[in-house]
Structure formats: C-alpha cells, structure tokens
Amino acid sequence: MASVHFRDVRKSFGATEILHGVSLDIADGEFVVLVGPSGCGKSTLLRMLAGLEEVTRGEIAIDDRVVNEVDSKDRDIAMVFQSYALYPHMTVRENMGFSLRLRKAERAIVDERVGRAAQILNLQAYLERYPRELSGGQRQRVAMGRAIVRDPKVFLFDEPLSNLDAKLRVAMRAEIKALHQRLKTTTVYVTHDQVEAMTMADRIAVMNEGRIEQLGEPLALYDRPANLFVAEFIGSPAMNLLDARLRRSDGAAWVELAGARWALAAGAPGADGQQVKVGVRPEHLRLGAEGLAGEVVVVEPTGAGTELVVQCDGASLTVVVHGRSGARPGDRVLLAPGPDHVHLFDASSGARL
Amino acid sequence: MSWKKAGTEARLLLVGIPVALWSAFPIYHIFLFAISSKDSAFSGALWPAQPTLRNFGAVFKQEHFFLYHFWQQMWNSLWIAATVGFLTLLIATCAAFAISRLRVRGGRLVMNAALFTYFIPAAFLAVPMYKAMSVYGLLNSSWSLVLAMVTLASPYAIWVLKQASDKLPWELDEAARIDGATPMQLFRLVYLPLMLPSLVAIGTYALLLAWNEYLYAFLLLSKETNVTLAVALGHFLSADDSPWELLMATGLLYGLPPAAIYYVFRRYMVGGLTAGAVKA
Ligand SMILES: Nc1ncnc2c1ncn2[C@@H]1O[C@H](COP(=O)(O)OP(=O)(O)OP(=O)(O)O)[C@@H](O)[C@H]1O
Ligand SMILES: [Mg+2]
C-alpha cells in the first residue's frame, strides 16, 4: 500500500504539450477516479504513473520515492488495460501467475495466490482455459486477477469496463468497488463515464485539456461544481445552463432571464447587474405557478421518474420529475428552481461565484 | 443446396479440374519415368507395361556414375537447407523484435535497406558473392553456400517478420513490462510463442530457398562430395545418353523432403493464435 504524488507534472509529445502541470496527491488506500472527455490526457497521466510514458517535466512519487526514472517493473504497480491485454498463449492460471513466475516465486506460493485470486473473482472453473475461450466479462476478471495476484502498491485501471455491455458494466463496477473495500489497495481509475466516476470514487479528479479542473468527493463535485466545465460534465442528465443578469436590492437577490425572475438564497454571492451563467440541475427545476415560461416538447418516462424537455425562448431545458408526470407535449409550463439549488458562474471566466 | 450455389460450384469445378490436371501432369510424368525401365521410358504410354522400382534401388545403392555420392549429396542438401533456415530465422527474429518491439534507433534504415536489396536480382550478385567467398577462403566449403543463402533470404525474412511483429498488440508488451518482464523475458515468454506461425513460415521459406538453389550451389561448390543434390541432378544432363529414368527417380526423391516439411508444419502456418488477447 502506498500514497501517490503528482507534482506539477507536464507531458509533451514532440512540440505539443498535452498535460500542463498536474498536481495531485492520492492518499494510502484511496480510490481516485480521473474523469474527463476524450483526449484530455487522463490515460497519459496514468501511463506516466505506470512508467509506460516518460515524464517531460515535474515529478511523480510513490510513497516518498520519486519514480520518474524507475522502470515499470520496479515500481510495484499493476495495471488493467481497456483491451485486457491477456497473454493469448497462456491459460488463465498462467496469465494470473505470470508476474510471480517472472519473480521466480515458488510453485506453491504461485498456486496459492492464483487460487485465492480466482476465488475472489469467481474464476476457479476457468483456470485451465485460454483467453479466447472466455467471454468479455470473464476476460475482464482475469485481467483483474492478474493485478490482484501481484499484491502491488497501486492498482491502475484504464477504462476497464468500456468494452462490456451496459448490464455487465454495472455488475463489474460493483465488483471492483467491493474488491477495493476488501483489499484497500491505493487505486487510480481512468474513465470518461461520469456515472462510473460518481459511483466508485472516494475522490474524483475532473480533467479537461490537460488540466485538473476540480478535485473532490463525488457529491461535493455534484453540489458545488467549481466551474462551468465541471458543472456540465458531472451529473446526468447534464445541468441546465442559461445566460442571466444578477440583481440584488434590500437584501434580496434574484436572477433575471428572458423576462422571468428566479429568487436566490439570501447569501448568494455576486454584484448587482453582473452578467452570469445560471445553472440548475434537471431534478431541481419545478413546474409551478410562476417562473420561466416554456413549452414541453418531449416527455420521456423512465419508470422511476419522467424526463421533460422544455423549450424556453431559444434555450432547451431538461426537467426531471419524480414519479409520473401529467405533462403532454405542447403544454405551456412555468419553470423555477428552489432558491438553494441555483448555481452561479461568472459569464466570462466560467468560475463559480 | 440451392441451384445458384450448385451453379457456382460447377463453374469453380470447371476451372479447378483443368488447373489441377495441368499442375499435376508434370509430376505424373516424372513418376512415370521413375517407374519405367530404361527401354520403355519413352514409349509414351500412360502407364508402363512393366512398372518397376529398380530405378529407386539403383539410386539408393548408388549404382551409377552420376549417383556415386547420392547419399552424401542428399545429406549436403539437408544440412545446408536446415542451417540456412535456422540462421535466417535467428537473424530475422532478433532483427524484427529489436525493430518492431524494442524500437531501436536505425530500425527504419534497416527496413528500407532490406526492401532495397530486392531491387537487385540474386543472379546479379552471384559473381560478387563468388569473389567474396574466395577472399574469405570459403570456396568449396558448405559454409560458403550457407552464408550466401542466409544473405539472400534474410532481408525478406526480416521484412515479413517485422510486419508480423507489428500486428502483435502493443498492450501485451506493456502488460509484460508491468508484470516485471525484462526484454529477454518478453522475447522468450511472450514474443516467440505468439510469433510461432510466422516463424515456421519464414523458416520454411528460407529452408526451401536453400534446398532449391541451383545457381549459387553450382558456382560456390564444385567437388562431387560437397555439391548439393540440385547440382548433382544438373550433372545428369552433361552426358549424351542421360539415364532419364534414374534422373527422374532421383528427382522424385529430391522432391520428397519439401513435401514432408510442408505436411509437418502445415498446422503451424494457420493464424489466429492471438485470438482473445485484446478485444478487437
Ligand atoms: N504517443 C502519442 N503521440 C502523440 N500524441 C499523443 C500520444 N498519445 C496521446 N497523444 C495525445 O495526447 C492527448 C491525450 O491523450 P490520452 O490518451 O491521454 O487521452 P484520454 O484522456 O485517455 O482520452 P480517451 O478517453 O479517448 O482515452 C490526445 O490529444 C492525444 O492525441
Ligand atoms: Mg484513454
């Protein structure tokens, strides 16, 4: 077990810099998820920790040891690849025991460790099979087994679930989480799926264009996104964002948008007359007697709730209603959020007010 | 089976049968000669009146002027071909691994040079090669032919093995590195097993190239006891009344090892060994 530290880490491929100074401290036993859109550099960051990419500038440390110049094999990490990367000419047993075999571990120890990993992952029945004889989910588990057997300081996962179908993905998500709770090994997990990030992480680092936009616990990110990017990225369906003007007088504060006004909580920040972006999560918008006028264009019942798409003066808002909704396409409605659930962002910088 | 399918099949047969006959006919002709007695060889019948195995007996017992060293020459051919196959494989595999997997500097240069050598016909190089071997004092030693053939076979072998190596998933190397493999262990435990089909194919290619070689063998070797069977067969034609039936019997025997090699290694030459490594 170990802590991991990125200190102002930069990475360039040729002349293009794709990571612009990432700093991140991961505590011993923590499960940190790196999440972000495609191409933001999360795999690169993970691969640098694995020793598969050179560090251009900055420092990566595992515990107190700077590993910039340390070979992959001497970093004591295990990695699960998106493609699984199982050795096709070895059985499941040989795949899982390969790292121990390279370390010249005794036969009995290898058997014992592989057996235990197989038991944890429910793979006992498949030990003598070859990867090509396994389903996607089983291959995935073998890849994890290969990592467990090592008993490494740090687990690295690079989108390990993206090749699985939706149902299996949910199941494996729970399995990985359970595994972490059981082994308590420090884990860095890369995904572009914010639901995965929200459900699995102790802390999430939201990345965009080679930078960490925000680092925090899942619900903290959800409740207080630090900027427009995180606000839009975290949460599903995504947060509604509208242009508005902030007003305050006599201790009251509100935003004006498209002829309507939404009240804000008493302590709301910002100056009178300031141009802002207003963010409201779909589940915090209410259909009511007053607010922003719009027309329902789509009604999507999901069973537990109903998703409405409401067209309001050029903007399209998503509303999630708990349970069933009587709304029909074509209905005219008025939308307002609860005052505690309005997020305000600076219109030009995008930072949270 | 639908009519349409039957029609397609019939048309394929219509093409296939003549092609098969066309290719099989010369072999049948050799066979016919080999089992005919000396007088009936040119009779033109489709089957000899009195088929005989005497010719083969004569070859095995080396009972003719041209055959005095048959077994020695057979051995020369085998030894040279096997050594060429082995050395070519060794060189080409190491080169392909270094260029494709370890990405050593200058790899592209080697690949371009390998391709370039194919613009020069092998026959062109025969005389320079003869000169080189004489400088090395290797003329009339089997090693001269071995070295020449390895030189001729290696560029193509490197080229093909490099292409095949490139198709192996890169993640496997990375996984092995993280698992703690040194480059040597990666080579031995991951790379070689996965390259096996290509290695067999290329080894066979080099082996057969050497087995079939005439020009270089003829130039570099001249003693009756160290020429290859291919050259020995050529000697038959130097006489006015060549013993055709013995030539054909020897020729048939000369054709057997390649056939056997093909038969043995056939199953290794199929691909699909990497199935299940990575999700495609
Ligand atoms: N070997 C390379 N050479 C040049 N550019 C690279 C290389 N590897 C990655 N990049 C670039 O670096 C950026 C980040 O790549 P990276 O693989 O880290 O993205 P990612 O966040 O993992 O995206 P995804 O979700 O699509 O996997 C991309 O713009 C990519 O084009
Ligand atoms: Mg990636």
Image (tube, rainbow, N blue to C red):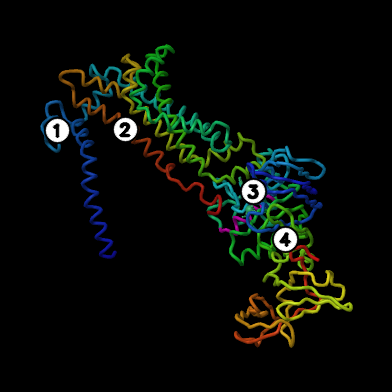
**Residue A311's quadrant in the figure?**
bottom right
Residue behind mark 2: B256
The chain holding disc 4 is A
Q: Residue B280 shows which numbered tag?
A: none
Type of amino acid under label 2: Leu
Residue with the mark numbered 3: A96
In front: mark 4 or mark 1? 4
Which residue of the protein is positioned furthest toward the front in this rendering? Answer: A273
Q: In what element is the residue under mark 1? A: loop
Q: Amino acid at mark 3?
A: Met
**Tag 4 residue:** A177
Q: Which residues are magenta?
A: A135-147
A220 or A28: nearer the eye?
Answer: A220
Q: Position of residue B252 (x, y in %)?
A: 26, 31
Q: Are marks 1 and 3 in contact (CB under 8 Å)?
A: no
Disc 1: residue Cβ within 8 A of ligand 1's nearest atom: no
Horizontally, residue B54 falls left or right of residue A267, namely left
Q: Quadrant of the C terminus of chain A?
A: bottom right
Between discs 1 and 2, the one toward the N terminus: 1
SS for dot 2: helix
Disc 1 chain ID: B
For the residues labelled 4 and 3, the Cα–Cα distance comes to: 20 Å
Please tell me whether mark 3 sits on a helix, a strand or a loop.
Answer: helix
Q: CA distance from mark 1 to mark 3?
A: 66 Å
The residue at which mark 1 appears reads as: B50
Q: Residues within 10 Å of mark 3 (few under 14, many from 20)?
A: many
- Mark whose residue sits in front, 1 or 2: 2
